[in-house]
């Protein structure tokens, strides 16, 4: 069994295939023990909580993606706080920095990340970070902060050296389908550098479909291809990688503790 530690099963891209209900109904057949449904703004965070409330196999995160950083107002932070009170909310996320788009509003993204980090600390929840083209600024943020409840770098896109630094800071490193791509040499090196007890796997469904299915809609079941790739990189049996990543995901999100 596997855990998809980061998926957007509410996304409209999945609607032609039956949407979240179809994904959830096929979990057992797909070898999935749990899916962590990740919020990107207040509406999707609310949807994640609703799905988790109704389905045993679903857990939720709540948070605002950096592209919507300007919506991290006092009022919306209060909404996130209330949503996070649900027993199946396991983290604040996805939050972070994404400067890939031209003219990204860096100060607003940084402020939004800081406010949501403070919320997570207050609630004693882990944080899930989306970092794209912003590792320099994220280093400045992280170097003076602690992460006692744990943290995840989702869909990791950095170097082996960056991964090693954040492992020392207490982070878990999550790999998506991008690690399976033939040209992902640096990502494979990063995966090799991450200790087994800090590796987790995800799909970021419906995005970032792994090889050999690249170009198609991504489903949570494809997390098996990510685990297979990591097992090859680490030279261990796939079954062992599945066991390890499940244990790690449960540990960082407190799932085994019934949070």
Image (cartoon, rainbow, N blue to C red):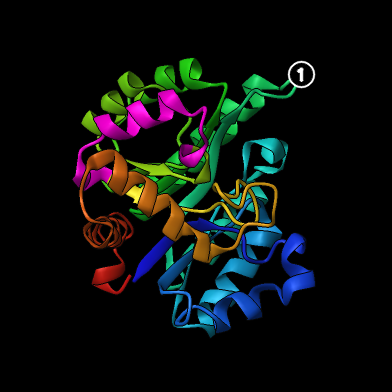
Residue name at image x 56 percent, y 78 percent: 24
The image quarter in which residue 2 lies: bottom left
Give the secondary structure at mark 1.
loop
The image quarter in which residue 172 lies: top left
The image quarter in which residue 191 lies: top left
Q: Decide whether residue 186 is among the magenta residues.
A: yes
Give x and y (percent) for residue 94. Answer: 54, 46
Quadrant housing the C terminus: bottom left
Q: Say above or below: 11 vs 115.
A: below
Residue name at image x 51 percent, y 49 percent: 93
Can I make out residue 184 in this image?
Answer: yes
Task: Please give the range of residues in magenta.
Answer: 179-198
- Along the viewing direction, whichever of 176 and 138 lies nearer the viewer: 176
**Residue 72 in the figure: left or right of residue 229:** right
Badge 1: few (under 14), some or many (20 or more) residues near its Cα, within 10 Å? few
Residue name at image x 54 percent, y 41 percent: 95
- Along the viewing direction, whichever of 221 and 59 lies nearer the viewer: 221
Give x and y (percent) for residue 155. Answer: 49, 41
- Along the viewing direction, whichever of 92 and 231 lies nearer the viewer: 231
Quadrant housing the N terminus: bottom left
Q: Say above or below: 29 vs 185.
A: below
Give x and y (percent) for residue 149. Answer: 28, 48
Q: Give the residue number, with chain letter if any, for mark 1.
A: 102
Q: Say above or below: 154 vs 23.
A: above
**Residue 45 in the figure: left or right of residue 158:** right
Give x and y (percent) for residue 69. Answer: 67, 37
Residue name at image x 34 percent, y 26 percent: 189
**Residue 124 in the figure: left or right of residue 120:** left
Q: Decide whether residue 184 is among the magenta residues.
A: yes
Taken as a whole, is the magenta stretch helix, strand or loop? helix
Numbered-mark total: 1
């Amino acid at each position: 069994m596997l855990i998809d530690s980061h998926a957007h099963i509410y996304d409209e891209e999945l609607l032609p295939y039956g949407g979240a209900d179809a994904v959830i109904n096929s979990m057992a057949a797909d070898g999935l023990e749990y899916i962590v449904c990740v919020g990107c703004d207040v509406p999707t965070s609310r949807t994640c909580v609703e799905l988790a409330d109704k389905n045993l196999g679903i857990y939720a995160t709540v948070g605002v993606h950096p592209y919507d950083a300007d919506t991290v107002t006092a009022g919306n932070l209060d909404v996130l706080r209330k949503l996070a009170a649900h027993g199946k909310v396991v983290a604040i996320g996805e939050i972070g920095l994404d400067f890939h788009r031209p003219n990204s509003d860096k100060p607003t993204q940084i402020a939004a990340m800081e406010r949501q980090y403070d919320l997570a600390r207050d609630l004693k929840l882990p944080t899930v970070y989306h970092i794209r083209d912003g590792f320099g600024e994220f280093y400045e943020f992280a170097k003076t902060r602690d992460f006692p409840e744990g943290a995840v770098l989702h869909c990791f896109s950095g170097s082996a050296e960056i991964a090693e630094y954040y492992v020392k800071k207490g982070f878990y490193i999550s790999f998506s389908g991008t690690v399976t791509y033939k040209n992902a040499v640096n990502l494979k090196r990063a995966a090799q550098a991450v200790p087994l007890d800090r590796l987790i796997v995800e799909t970021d469904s419906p995005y970032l479909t792994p090889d050999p299915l690249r170009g198609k809609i991504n489903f949570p079941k494809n997390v098996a291809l990510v685990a297979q790739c990591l097992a090859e990189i680490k030279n261990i049996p796939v079954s062992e990688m599945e066991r390890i990543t499940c244990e790690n995901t449960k540990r960082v999100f407190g799932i085994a503790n019934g949070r």
